[in-house]
Amino acid sequence: MSHSTIGTADQLRDPNYMPPMGQAVPLGIQHVLAMFVSNVTPAIIVAGAAGIGFGSDQGALGFPDMTYLIQMSMLFAGIATLFQTIGMGRVGARLPIVQGTSFAFVPIMVPAVAGLGTAGLAGLMTGVILGGIFHFCLGFIVGRIRYALPPLVTGLIVLMIGLALVKVGIQYAAGGVPNIGKPVFGSLSMWIPALVVVLVTLAVKFFARGFMAVAAVLIGILAGYIVAYLMGQVSFAKVGYAAMFALPQPFKYGFELNWAIVIGMCFMAVVSAIETVGDTSGITKGGAGREATDDEVAGATFADGLGTSIAGIFGGLPNTSFSQNVGLVAMTGVMSRHVVTIGAIFLIICGLIPKIGAIINTVPINVLGGGVIVMFGMVCASGINMLSDVKWSRRNMVIFATALSVSLGLQQVPDALQHVGPTLKILLTTGLLPAATIAIVLNLVLPEDLPE
């Protein structure tokens, strides 16, 4: 599809331009396919950590709740994307920004639902609601706090998010957390589909062009899924129980205030807001060759927070802007927000059909593991890429070294904090909070000219 068939150069750079429907619909669905796997994966990880099980009735909540969390990920990604593309008052950047469930919050959400004296899904959803409100409020000041978060700080935080997640990828590829200690864990039958996913993803990413390259992880997972099916690892037995249509349920898991979760969510909201600022700037630079305006940055942050808070009310997870779709805007050269609106409507329709969530839930955990190994590695690589913009003076090396050493060490030896109380222990052993706090504080207080 050449640019000339979609519109003129000026039209392509205009967020308000509407391409012909014959081109707009495929472009909108392409945006959905680019983010689809990354969007539903956090729900599957959190559901597994909460003891819901994976494609079975393992755990106290069982299969329907896994499907529900996947369903909410699609529904509220679509709704939050509409907040961005259509907007309401000051809410929304009115740019082609795609929202989706954020990986950044996973290292906070997993310990929140997996015990450690926390309140489970009720406490998590309450934290999502309150964190979303806090995130919304950041829209009023986000422009003024950007100076405190240079690439040294943001790159370190993104790197720590990736490092916190890579363990999950290997656990899933080897057979999943419920199988640790069992003979099937780490067996060749588990690893073969996972490795097929990794190899096909890499092959498509490097040797395909256009849409195929954008959807490389999705294609890799489909290939691994076929192999797993041929190996007898896929079951459709529960798909028949899922409804064809269902509305979200407010406060499905209850309401329970847990300060460790609320503080963690509010802190990660700051990280997510800065990520959204970067994505907003990336879209205007890549699609229109200009800087994002203050109103666009603030509007994008308001939409982030509102989308997250509303999702939490109905049992959804935190939303943020999706960076892979920023790259897609630059690659296609189509800046139209209406194209992304079409994609958002497609996501909402999927989110109202539990059957789709049930089918996604048939993907074996080792197949998903192969996909997330690549995705979580890319999160680490993104952090390193951001750090490449840092001028590595002795001052910056000291800040980076101290923050990385303390945060990674506490993450690996959580018992070192067994006397600090459960709330503080959860916050400090995520790895993210100590890394960000140390880096931000040292960056603000240390003089620029440390003796070399």
Image (spheres, helix red, strand yellow):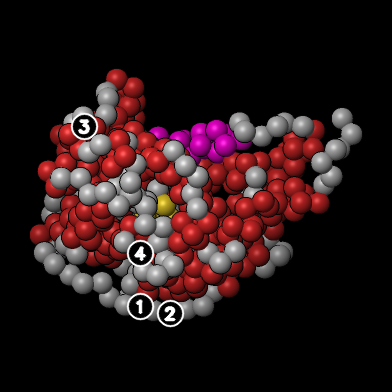
Which region is colored magenta? 369-387
Q: Earlier in the sequence, mark 3 or mark 4?
A: 3
Q: Is residue 382 magenta?
A: yes
Foreground: 200 or 51?
A: 200
- Closer to the camera: disc 1 or disc 4? 4
Q: Earlier in the sequence, mark 3 or mark 1?
A: 3
Q: Earlier in the sequence, mark 4 or mark 2?
A: 4
Q: Residue 251 — which label?
A: 1
Q: Secondary structure at mark 2?
A: loop
The residue indicated by pointer 4 is 87
Circles 2, 1 touching at the beta carbon (< 8 Å): yes
Determine the residue positioned at 27% across, 25% down: 209
Cα separation between marks 2 and 1:
7 Å
Task: Locate residue 71 relative to residue 273 in the image: left or right.
Answer: left
Q: Which quadrant of the structure image shows residue 419?
A: bottom right
Q: Secondary structure at mark 1?
A: loop
Residue 397 in view of the camera:
yes
Cα separation between marks 1 and 4:
25 Å
In percent of width and height, residue 137 lies at 54, 69
Determine the residue positioned at 40% across, 41% down: 288
Q: Which quadrant of the structure image shows residue 160?
A: top right
- Closer to the camera: disc 2 or disc 3? 3
Q: Earlier in the sequence, mark 2 or mark 3?
A: 3
The residue type indicated by label 1 comes to Phe
Task: Locate residue 240 relative to residue 336 in the image: left or right.
Answer: left
Label 4 crowding class (10 Å Cα cut-off): few <14, some 14-19, many 20+? some
- Closer to the camera: disc 3 or disc 1? 3
The residue indicated by pointer 2 is 255
In percent of width and height, residue 28 lies at 23, 47
Determine the residue positioned at 48% across, 49% down: 292
The residue indicated by pointer 3 is 4
